Amino acid sequence: MIPMIFSSTLLVGLVSWFLWEKSHRKTRDMPAGLHKDISLPFTQEYELYHNNLSLCSKKVRACMAELDIDYKSHPIELIETGSYENIGRDYLTVNPGGLVPTLVHNGHPVYESHAIIAYLAKLKEGAGGNTLVPADEADRAAMQTWIDKASLTGDDPTTNIKRSAANCAGLLTTPLMVSALQDIPLRLIFEGLLFHRIRSRAAIFMIMKLRGLSGFTKIKPLMNALGEARNNMELHLDALDEHLLGNGPHIIGNQLTLADISWLVILERLVEADWMEFFLRGDQRPNVQRYWQYLQQTQGYKIGILEFQSTVMDAAIQRLKSHKRNNPAFTASLEGQRQ
Ligand SMILES: N[C@@H](CCC(=O)N[C@@H](CS)C(=O)NCC(=O)O)C(=O)O
C-alpha cells in the first residue's frame, strides 16, 4: 500500500513539474532582425548572448571585433558544451527560439547571425574606418551572395546544403558533437526531448550520445547526410577558390567585408572539426589556403574566436582526432571515397 501511495505521489509530482515547466518555457520560431516590440533589461548599449563553440556566435563576435564594438558578454551553454541553458526559462525570455546568438541593442533583441552582422554594419555606416560594407552597389550585391552562401539557414541543416556552405559545415560538425556529448550526462540531454523547440534536433543528440563515436557511423541516414554535406562542401570550396583567383586576399575588392567574416567562421569550423586537412589536402585549393592564412591575421579571428576557447571542446577535439588515428575504418567512413 505504502509503495503504491509513494509511486502515485511521485508520478503526480513529475507530471505537475513537467506541465509547470512547459508553461514557463514557451518556444517559437523568431524571425530574423530587430524586434522593437520586445524590451529586455539591459545595462549596456550592446549585449551579446552567445556560445564559444557556436559558429553563428563566432561570426557575430568576429564582426563586433572588426567594428570595434564593446559589448556585455552573456555566455550561454548549449548541450554540446555542457547543458541546455539555451532552452532554460531565463534565456527563452531573451530568445524564445532557444538559439544563439542574440544581440540586444538598447534593450531590443536582434535575431539570426546574418541579420545581426548586417544590422551592426548599418549602424556603423558613415562612422569612418572600414564598416565591412563596400560603397559600390554592385560590390554590395556580390557581397550579399557570398554572405548567403555562408549563412546557416532553417532549423534542419540537411536542407539547403547545395546553397549553403554553413549548412554543410553544421553537418560536418556531427563527429565532433558526438565526441563532445560523451562528457555530457544523459539526463541533461533528455531535457531537450521535453522542452526543445526543435524536437528532432534534441532526438538526434540523444541518439548520438547513445551510439558514441564507434556507433554513430552505422546510422545510415546520418552518414548519408554527412556524405552529402562533404560532397557539397567540396563544391562550395571549389567556387570560393575559383573566385579568389584574381581577387583576394578579400572576397570583394580590396577591403574586408561581411562576406569575409561569414567565411572566416566556416573555414575555422573546418579546422576545429578536423576537416581542413581533408579539404585542402596536398596543394588543393591554393587560393583558399592563402585566404585562410590571411583571415587568421584579422582582429575578427584573433579577438572574436581565439579569445573564446572552450576547454570542453578542446577535449572533444582531441578525443575525435585520437579516435580517427586509431580507427582507420572510422576515418574512411567519414571521408568516403577520396578522389
Ligand atoms: N540561423 C541561425 C542559426 C542559429 C543556430 O542554429 N544556433 C545554434 C548554434 S550555431 C544553436 O543555438 N543551437 C542550440 C540548439 O539547437 O540547441 C543564425 O544564423 O543565428
Image (tube, rainbow, N blue to C red):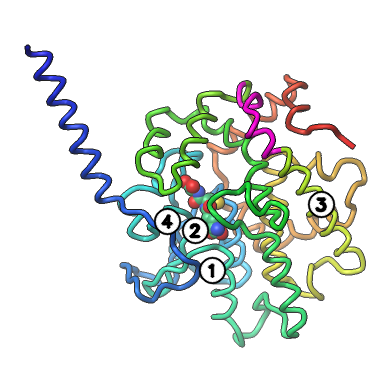
Residue type pointed to by label 4: Gly
- Give the residues drawn in magenta, as a range: 215-226
Residue type pointed to by label 3: Leu
Residue type pointed to by label 2: Pro
Disc 2 Cβ-to-ligand 1 distance below 8 Å: yes
Residue 176, image x, y percentages: 62, 36
Cα–Cα gap, marks 4 and 1: 15 Å
Name the chief secondary structure element in magenta.
helix
Q: Quadrant of the N terminus?
A: top left
Look at mark 4 in the image and give the residue it sits on. Answer: 97
Say if mark 3 contacts mark 4, CB within 8 Å. Answer: no
Cα–Cα gap, marks 2 and 1: 9 Å
Q: On the picture, is 207 further left or further right than 9? A: right
- The secondary element bearing badge 3 is classed as helix
Residue 144, image x, y percentages: 69, 72
- The secondary element bearing badge 2 is classed as loop
Look at mark 3 in the image and give the residue it sits on. Answer: 235
Residue type pointed to by label 1: Ile
Look at mark 2 in the image and give the residue it sits on. Answer: 101
Q: Is residue 160 above or below residue 173?
A: below
Whichever of labels 4 and 1 marks the residue nearer the N terminus, that label is: 4
Q: On the picture, is 48 further left or further right than 173? A: left
Look at mark 1 in the image and give the residue it sits on. Answer: 116
- Whether 218 is among the magenta residues is yes
Task: Tell me what residue is drawn at x 12 percent, y 13 percent.
Answer: 3
Disc 4 Cβ-to-ligand 1 distance below 8 Å: yes
